[in-house]
Every structure is written in structure tokens, then in C-alpha cells.
Image (spheres, coloured by chain):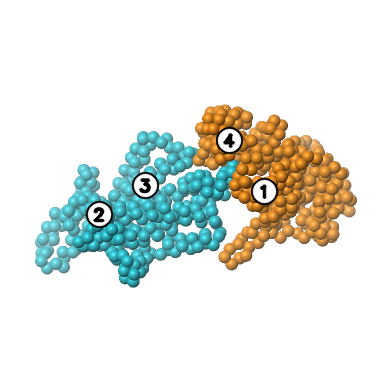
Chain colours: A orange, B cyan
Amino acid sequence: MVDPLLSVRDLKVHFSVGRGLLNPGQLVKAVDGVSFDIAPGEVVGLVGESGSGKTTLGRSVLRLIEPTSGSIKFNGTELVGLEAQRMKALRSDMQIIFQDPFASLNPRMSVREIIGEALFLHGIGSSADREDRITALLDRVGLPATAAPRFPHEFSGGQRQRIGIARALAVNPKFIVADEPVSALDVSIQAQIINLLQDLRREMGLSLLFIGHDLSVIEYLCDRVVVLYLGKVMETAKAADLYASPRHPYTRALLDAAPVTHPDARRERVALKGDPPSPINPPSGCVFRTRCPFAVEACAQTQPPLTAFGDDQHVACIRANELNLAEYNVQSAATG
Amino acid sequence: MSLSYLLRRLGGAIPLLLGISVILFAIIHLAPGGPLDMYLENPSVSPEAIEQMRTAYGLDQPVPVQYFLWLKSMLAGDWGYSIRTGKPVLSEILNRLGPTLQLSGLALGFAFIVAMPLGVISATRRGSKLDTGLTLFSFAGISTPVFWMALLFQLLFSVQLGWLPSAGYQSVGDGSLVDRLRHLVMPATVLSFAIIASWSRYIRSGMVDVLNQDYIRTAYAKGRTEIGVVVLHALRNAMIPAVTVIAVDFATIISGAVITETVFAWPGIGRLFMEAMDGRDYPILMGLMMLGSFGIVLANVIADVTYAALDPRIRYG
């Protein structure tokens, strides 16, 4: 395998909440010991429920949120603890596309200023060159050059997301974190944006960390998938393997939760009950055990490590070996 | 933004000001006593003379009639004459305008320069000890009565330390710039305290709101440093809600800081208002209050115009 572009090791992001004058507050472990790699040109999907730490992880990888501990190596440079000036220089290589295209563009700046600011900050081109580049970028994301002097509120959600993408592309990044870039958009627009990302990835050799909860989008776009639950990695595998043979009960439950396209289709499902436990007081042992239909007593004892299965599939479950989730039948689990 | 929009806004203020004038006139006349009461206990003024003055000033007419007489002359540009001094209302007001503009100009300018960074620092260091300290300071500033703070200042800087004159506009027989500034410093500082306290809160809450927006993260992702993000991205957006408060405060304070001017014997609009209240000087009171109302209407129009300049989403047709 080639050297990874991005290599995250044992990353932890902890927040203290509810701290007041007298109250010492509590610790939320939003991301708790996550490791993964992204190869050049690879698209990695990050899935999990709301509150699983996906967004926090995506932002802390770019140090938009300061990690508590761990290591993030980008192109061989350690980002954690990197001084501000060098971090700023690196920002041109790593960009982010946000979920909400209505909130992520400064309402007081024109499209030209929004895209041009990044070029200016990284000293790309003269001001005349920049104007050409802005036009080219707008064209690349399917917007006319006449969009440049206009303000964000004059555009629809899909158009705004295109502006956000043009802005991210402006500095020629090698790596982009796409934080649920389509979940705020209409379904018809979603497809356009996803196809745009797919094209850009092919043409520019971009690496992507694609955060989402729409599993069909992830399957379409991603080479590899990381499944996150309560700030911990449950399973990571090549997309094809993960969808064909999930090995972690949580992955299987996520796949089962996706709607089926045909109304007559029937299948066995692993359904989860209740809400994820609070990340302030996570369960002992395996964090998923409180909702896992296969949990046994041993699950409460130790935190299962990520264990390798076959070709690049890693699962954090002590029963991964004995469960055959790909052909699992609900009925038998209920009785047995 | 068009000229016709401005004219329409100002034109719309005319019925508003008319309504205000009716209410003000009624309230003034609801208060017991009248401008001629000061002569009642003066043995050298005969009851006949008082009666004669009452007729001369039109005070014997019913209140509605008095109102229309006042309105008629006002519309003709005649603000009337002070009952106390006999001088024209307009020149009485203009005489006091200079000192008030000096005092409020300095106080507002100082307040703006101080409140802005305080609010920004509080917001960017939210939850820190510094923020808590500034919050306490703000609440203290808002809840401390101005007259009390003024007395404390006088006690410390004039009585105890003897650094500054306790009151007045200038020393008798002196009128140099230094002397006037020495008189100006204390009232201006006292006046600005409460304004700083409230403005810094508005700026803080506006900033806190904006700093949580995604486009602030976008700016960091572009490679802006914290100062760049705060000044170029956050402040421009955070100022929008603060503009209304600042504009209306501006109008209120320019039209006279009554308490501060009274405690410091500052010969400004606020003190004129106090004197006119004491003497039930109806023409002066009406003149001052109409000017103040117009100032607030104007400040609101200016605030709206400023919005459009600050926020491209706002368009007026």
C-alpha cells in the first residue's frame, strides 16, 4: 500500500460541558481513540448516528476543533501541536465543505470575495489572475461567471453548496473533508452535487473524507468506510466488503435501517431500540453493548480492540468471529 | 436604497410626531401647577398682574385650544417664548446645545471605543474568568444609578484627591481649553460608564451568535488567523443587531443627559429640561421633547439605512 496522505492515530477530542463557577463540569468524549488512514486519491466514508462524533472528528482532523490528544499526520507532517503559521500554510492542501450551505457562506461577502479570500490569503495569483481563476472555478462547479458579484442569499441551496465547493477547490487542495455536504439539500439536487464531487475526485485526484448517514450515497462514492459509534470506531472495511458482509452488529443495524427501494421487498432486520447512551457516561466495556441484540456478559468487561478480518476489514467486537451477520436470521436470535 | 425611500420614511414620521405632540402636550398639562405658580407667593406681584399674564400667555384657554395655538405657530416655524426667561425657545435650546454636544460626543465616542473591544474579547473568550469579570462589570454598570456614581466620582476626584473640579462648565474668570477639559472629564466618564456596560453586552451577544456560525469555520479553514476572522468576518455581522441600540442611545443622549448634567451642573440640554420642568415652562418643554422625538425617529431611519449598508440581504425599495 502507498504511504497514506492522512494518517490519524488514537485521536481523542474531549469537551467539558456544564462548567460553571462552582460546577466542575463533565467530560464528553466526542471522539475517543480513533485511528484510520486515507491514501492519496482515496475516498473514505464516515458513518454513524447523530451524536456519534462524525462532525467533530472531521473538523478536528483539520484542527478546526483542537484535538485533546493523538496524532494526525498529513503528508508526513504532524498537525497536532503544529504552530499557527505552518498550519495556515497547510490549509491550502486541506479544505472542508460544510453541511449547511445557508450557514457556511458569510452573508456579508459576495461570491467573488468568498472565493477570492482564500486565494488572497495563500498568495495565489495576481489580482487579475484571481478574477480568471474565480470564473474558472465557478464554471467548474456549474455556475455562470455572472454569479461572482452576487451575494449568497441570492442563490438556492444547491447553488450555494456549489459555491462552497468552488471555495474549497480554490486553493487546489489535496484533501477535502465533506461534512454531510448533501443532507441539507433536496434529493434531486443531492444527485447533482454527488456527481460533481465524483467528477472532481476523478479529475483532480482528490482525497475525500465523506461524512454522511445516507448509506447508499456512501456506497456509491466511497472506497472505504469507517463506522463510528459514540466516538469509537466499530468497523472499518472496503465499501464493497462492508456492504456485502458486515461483521459488527452495529454496521448490520445501520444497513438494515436504510429504506428498501422496492415496496414488496422483505428481509430480516436488526433493529436498534432506544437512543445512543450519553457520551458523558458511556457504558463499560463495549460502548455498543447496551443496544446490541447479541451482547453477552463478557461485553461489559473489556473494550474490544479493532481486530483484522480478511482483506483490510477491522472489527471491534469480541463476538465477530462467531456471529454470521451476513446471513443472520432475526427469528433465531429472538429465540436463541 | 433610494432617495424616495428616505423621503417616504421621513414623511411617515410626520403623523407619528403629531401624535407624540398631542400626548406630550396632554401629559404636561396633566401635571399639577403651572408656569405662573412661582409668582403666587411673591407679595410684589398682584393677583391682577398674574391674571393678566395668564391671558397674555393664553393659559386661560382650554387645553385643546392651547394645543392648536401651539401647533399653529410651531408649523409656522415659531417655537414660542420661554415663560421663565421671556427669551425665544429656539435660542434657549441652541445656547445649551454646544455643551451637551461636547459632553455626549465625548462620552459616546469613548463608550464606542471601549465597548467594542470589551464585547469582542468577552465573546471570543466566552466562559473564561475574563469574560465572567467583564460580565460582572457590565451588570454593575447597568444597575448602578448614574446620580450615585456621579456623587462617588465627585467624592473621590474632587473632595478626596482634589484633582478635578466637582461641577460646572468652566471656572469663573478662566475659560481656557485645559480648564474646560478638566470640567468635562468627570461627567463624560460617568455618562459613558452605563453606555459601555450596555453596549458591550449587545456586542458580546451578537459576536457569540456569529462566532458559532459555519462561515466562521469556513474562514478558519481558508487560513485566516483569529484576529482576521474576528475583525473581517465576525464583527461585520455582529454589528447588525447592535446598530439599533447604538443609534437610539445616541439620539437619547444627544437630546440631553438629564441626570448627569444636573449633578455636574453642566449647562446643557438636559439641565435646561430639568429647569423647565421645575418652572412648568411649557414652551421650552414642548420644544425640547419634540426635538428629542424627532431625534429618535431620525436615529431609527439612520439605523435602517446602516443595516442596508452592513447587510446585503436587506434591500429597501
Indicate the secondary structure of the residue bearing disc 2. helix
Q: CA–CA distance between discs 2 and 1?
A: 64 Å
Instruction: Check if mark 2 and mark 1 are on a common chain.
Output: no
Label 2 to label 3: alpha-carbon separation: 21 Å
Name the outermost residue toward the bottom: B160
Query: SS for tag 1?
Result: loop
Residue type pointed to by label 3: Ala
Judge the density around disc 1: few (<14), some (14-19), many (≥20) Cα neighbours within 10 Å. Answer: many
Residue that appears at 29% across and 66% down: B166
From the viewer's perspective, tell me whether residue A10 is left or right of residue B16: right
**Do callouts 1 and 3 point to residues on the same chain?**
no
Q: Is residue B42 left or right of residue B265?
A: left
| Distance from the alpha carbon under mark 1 to that under mark 3 | 50 Å
User: Mark 4 to mark 1: distance in Å?
Assistant: 23 Å
Of discs 2 and 3, which sits in the foreground?
2
Labels 4 and 1 positioned on one and the same chain: yes
Kindly identify which chain the residue marked by label 3 belongs to.
B
Amino acid type assigned to the residue bearing label 1 in the image: Leu
Which mark is in front, 4 or 2?
Answer: 4
Q: Helix or strand or loop: what does disc 3 sit on? A: helix
Q: Which mark is residue A124?
A: 4
Quadrant hosting residue B125: bottom right
Q: Position of residue A336 (x, y in %)?
A: 89, 53
Residue B240: where, in percent of width, then height? 46, 46
Q: Is residue A237 shown to the viewer in this render?
A: yes
Q: Which residue is mark 2?
A: B96
Query: What is the number of the mark on residue A79?
Result: 1
Q: Which mark is residue B299?
A: 3
Q: Decide: few, some or many residues near mark 2? Use Cα within 10 Å; few <14, some 14-19, many ≥20.
A: some
